[in-house]
Every structure is written in structure tokens, then in C-alpha cells.
Amino acid sequence: MTRIYNFSAGPAALPEEVLAQAQAEMLDWHGAGLSVMEMSHRGKEFMSIAEQAETDLRELLRIPSNFKVLFLQGGATSQFAMIPMNLIGRTGKADYFRTGSWSKKAINEASRYGSVRISADTEVEGKFTSVPASDAVSVSPDAAYLHYTPNETIEGVEFPYVPETGAVPLVADMSSTILSRPLDVSRFGLIYAGAQKNIGPAGLTIVILREDLLHTPLDGTPTMFSYATHAESGSMYNTPPTYGWYLAGLVFKWLLANGGLAEMAEVNRRKAQLLYEAIDASGFYSNPVDPFCRSWMNVPFTLADAELDAEFLKQAGEAGLKTLKGHRSVGGMRASIYNAMPEQGVGALVDFMAEFERTRG
Ligand SMILES: *Cc1c(COP(=O)(O)O)cnc(C)c1O
């Protein structure tokens, strides 16, 4: 068996140890005589899996006790609607930062439920390569919340700070950055993330929200789209994504066994630095993002001659370096280097890039 280095933005690589453990437990979980996929979500075996996963996530992120953790379906994209449906009602207004492709989608959806003010917009000539300076952000005092995207997965732009919003709840789409480094959850009102980047398999969505934000849904909000429904039922109002929940739990255990988020941050910082330094030192590769807000997780880069893109991807693939094609809206390449990407993988990519530049650049 040869495993590739998978630089996919999502669904993304999972830690090999986690996949091996899931394989070992596939037919018979801990002597229960069945697979986790076959368990009742209300039975004592799955309840123990679910509770342990939440306990471990709370430990990793030091989630305060006045926050609920929800294990939902529907992806981050469903949250684009669920957030305004549940939160915008208090004042009818919300502030949004417009910093890239994902925040644009969140804004479009929220506009259907209330009045959206764009309180920061970093688009320049159709491109997003920066974030607002921390002292330049303003919040409307009557906003029900401020929404932002800490890491724009497509553009590779990441906030190096958490915006200060005073009493206005801060809402963050952390799909591609959650668990990449320690986080002060108490600064936020709500954090959400689709699992398939840095948590587990697609199909699971995690929402972490402050309890006082639970009870203001708009009239007509479907039962399944109300946070209170899921908070009050322990995310078991209907059948939750049980296998994804279990695998996420294995990933949380893997993170804890490998030094937690402080250690992840160190490794992720080193991986990103290695790749950006290689790009900046070359006259052949380039990354357009302002150096102060370059993403640790998604690194887009272009070749000096786009005619060579196909050849780059072909040779990289032959070297076991896969899924490096950039998003169609940005072009070029994108290397997603989430927690599960080992340092050796980034090393192999940097070596390959140097060799390609030497022979074809
Ligand atoms: C991938 C991604 C999404 C979309 O997630 P789905 O789970 O496919 O809905 C939203 N926001 C960000 C920042 C993402 O990276």
C-alpha cells in the first residue's frame, strides 16, 4: 500500500493513525459485536462515543461551560442560513466582513433574512488578498452579530487576530482553520465548521455557541433549523451523523495524544513557513496574499508561466503529490496543509517544486 500526500482543500487528508484505528474497529467496536455505523444513536455504546467526543473537543479548545457544542448535518453552507434565522431577529440587522469567496456566500444568504451591512470589504480589482487592519474594523452597535471568515479557504487569506466587537456577538466560519491552533472561545458568540477540512469526514458540522444566543429564532424557522432544538436534545432530535461524529472523536483523541493545539500550532506554523519561504525565494512561484495574513492552512501559488500548470500537476501527481490544482476562481495551484498533512509531505512538495523550477522554470 502506498498512500499519497493529499493536498485537497476538502474533503481533506485524515491522520493515517485515525484511519487505521477506524479500520481495526470497523467490524466490531470494542467487543460490541457491531460497527459504529450499525449502532442505535440512542444506545449506550454510541452515547459513550458521542459524549467522549464532546468532552475531548471541549478539552482541546477549552470551551467554557456556558457554550453548547452541536453535532449537526448540512455543512457550513446550511449555517449561512441557520445563523441569521436564529440570531438576526434581535435587531433585524447584522454586520459582515467581505473578505473572499466564502464570506460572499454567507452574505448572500443572510441578506434573505434581514438587513446586512458590509462593515469591511477587501476586494480590489476582483481579488481578495488581504484582511482589514485590526484597528480599522468597526461594528454597528445595533448589529445582532458580526460575521466573518477567519480563513478564506479559496484565497488563502487568514485573519492573524480576532476582531474586537464589544457587546456584539462575534460569529466565525472556522471550517478551514478550527483546531489548527489554540483559540479563546470566550471571545465568540458562535463558531461553526464543516468537518471535512480539519475535523473528520464530510457530513458532520460542528457548531459551538453561547447559551444566551439560543432563543431568538425568526418566526417560521423550521424545527430542524433552530439551534434550541439541537441544544435541548443533545444533537439527537433526529438521527445525527453517527459515523462522522465517531471519526471526529478519533481525530480529537489523536490531537490530544500529539500535544494538543499548542503543538499543532507549532507544526502548522513550521509547515506554512517552509512553503511560503520556498515560494518567496523563487523567481518562478508566487503567492499574492499580504504576508501578514497568509493562511497557515491553504496556500495558493501560481507558476510564472501558466502554460506549465498541466505539466506541474502531472509530474507532481507522479511523485505522489496530489490534488494541488487551485480553485477555478483563483487559478494556479493550492496546497492545503491541514493538521493531518505531515511535515514530510510539505517537505516533499517543496523539494518537488525546486526540482520542477530547475528543469522547467
Ligand atoms: C468548505 C467551506 C465551506 C463550505 O462547507 P460545506 O460543508 O461544503 O457546506 C464554507 N466555508 C468555508 C470557510 C469553507 O472552507
Image (cartoon, grey):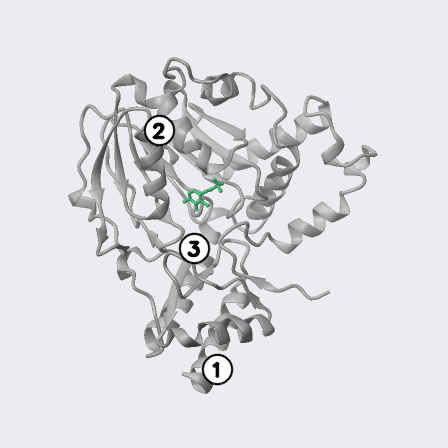
Q: Is residue 168 left or right of residue 348?
A: left
Mark 3 to mark 2 CA distance (whole Å): 24 Å
In front: 61, or 78?
78
| x and y, in percent, of residue 37 in the image | 72, 35
Choose top left, top right, bottom left or bottom right for residue 98: top left
The quadrant of the image that shows the C terminus is bottom left
Q: Residue furthest bottom?
A: 359
Q: Quadrant of residue 26?
A: top right
Q: Amino acid at mark 3?
A: Met
Q: Quadrant of ligand 1?
A: top left
Q: CA distance from mark 2 to mark 1?
A: 47 Å
Q: Is residue 135 left or right of residue 8?
A: left
Q: Quadrant of the N terminus?
A: bottom right
Q: Residue at x 61, y 21 (%)?
A: 238
Residue 32: image location, x then y, percent: 81, 32
User: Crowding at label 3, few (<14), some or many (≥20) Cα neighbours within 10 Å?
Assistant: many
User: Is residue 97 shown above or below 84?
Assistant: below
| Disc 1 from disc 3: Cα separation | 23 Å
Residue 189: mark? 2
Q: Secondary structure at mark 2?
A: loop
In the image, the residue with mark 3 has its CB under 8 Å from the nearest atom of ligand 1: no
Residue drawn at x 62%, y 32% is 241
Mark 1, other Cα within 10 Å: few <14 / some 14–19 / many ≥20:
few
As shown in the figure, which amino acid type bears the numbered disc 2?
Gly
Q: Secondary structure at mark 3?
A: loop
Please report whichever mark, 3 or 2, sits nearer to the chain's N-terminal start.
Answer: 2
Report the mark closest to the observer, 2 or 1: 1
Visible in this render: residue 62?
A: no
Q: Which residue is mark 1?
A: 355
Q: Which residue is mark 3?
A: 297
Q: Secondary structure at mark 1?
A: helix
Residue 183 is situated, as x and y percent measured from the top left of the image, at: 39, 41
